[in-house]
Amino acid sequence: MPVRRPPPPEIRAILEGAAAKHGIPAELVISVAHAESRYDPRAVSPAGAMGLMQLMPRTAEGLGVSDPFDPRQSADAGAGFLSRLYARFGNWPKTLAAYNWGPGNVKRHPLPEQWPSSTRRYIARILDTPIDESAPPQPTPWAPAPSTPAAPAPSTPAPLLAVAALLGLALLASRARR
């Protein structure tokens, strides 16, 4: 099983705060940020997605982001978008497929077998990749803005959500490896 490096402490705090604000698992938001930008707030994809959470320009605008390269705005918008997608699709694999491939595509093609293999691999990478806390954090690729306190992480984990996500993930990961 592949293992990813943890984010720089400043990025971790931003991502955890955004996850707590929107009521979604912090490790999921951290995994999405790693898959999307390798924690680089200045990342730009060939398709034009920008920032830490790789928001497309229209998506960023629709989410109220004025600077997609500001890690706080990107994390907040990305976590909020993930939260809304989860409310719409009801499970993490479909939520992640919608984040990666687009909500309209997932609505038209709701079965994982209908999704591009790149989207299935993306989902498997996010849901099946633990953090290696023993690895040194990646260096911070940006000059931190004045710090604001992160929202506290929820004190009670959501075990049912975690179990449901893992069950759906195991099925999806096995299909992605085919």
Image (cartoon, rainbow, N blue to C red):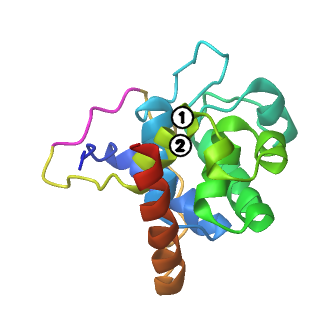
Residue 68 in view: yes
Per the image, label 2 sits on a secondary structure element best described as helix
Q: Position of residue 165 (x, y in %)?
A: 51, 69
Q: Is residue 101 magenta?
A: no
Tell me whether circle 1 and circle 2 mark residues in contact (CB < 8 Å). Answer: yes
- Residue 84 horizontal side relative to residue 37, left or right: right
Occupied quadrant, residue 48: top right
- Number of the label disc, if any, that sits on residue 1: none
Whether 29 is drawn above or below 158: the answer is above
- Number of the label disc, if any, that sits on residue 117: 1
- Disc 1 crowd rating (10 Å Cα; few below 14, some 14-19, many 20+) is some
Amino acid type of the residue that numbered disc 2 sits on in the rendered structure: Arg
- Residue 95 horizontal side relative to residue 108, left or right: left
Pick whichever, 96 or 147, lies toward us. 96
Pick whichever, 122 or 17, lies toward us. 122
Amino acid type of the residue that numbered disc 1 sits on in the rendered structure: Ser
Q: Position of residue 89 (x, y in %)?
A: 75, 62
Residue shown at 46%/45% (left/top)?
Answer: 176
- Disc 2 crowd rating (10 Å Cα; few below 14, some 14-19, many 20+) is many
Pick whichever, 118 or 84, lies toward us. 118
Segment tinted magenta in the rendering: 136-141
Residue shown at 72%/27% (left/top)?
Answer: 56
Q: Position of residue 149 (x, y in %)?
A: 51, 60
Per the image, label 1 sits on a secondary structure element best described as helix
- Number of the label disc, if any, that sits on residue 120: 2
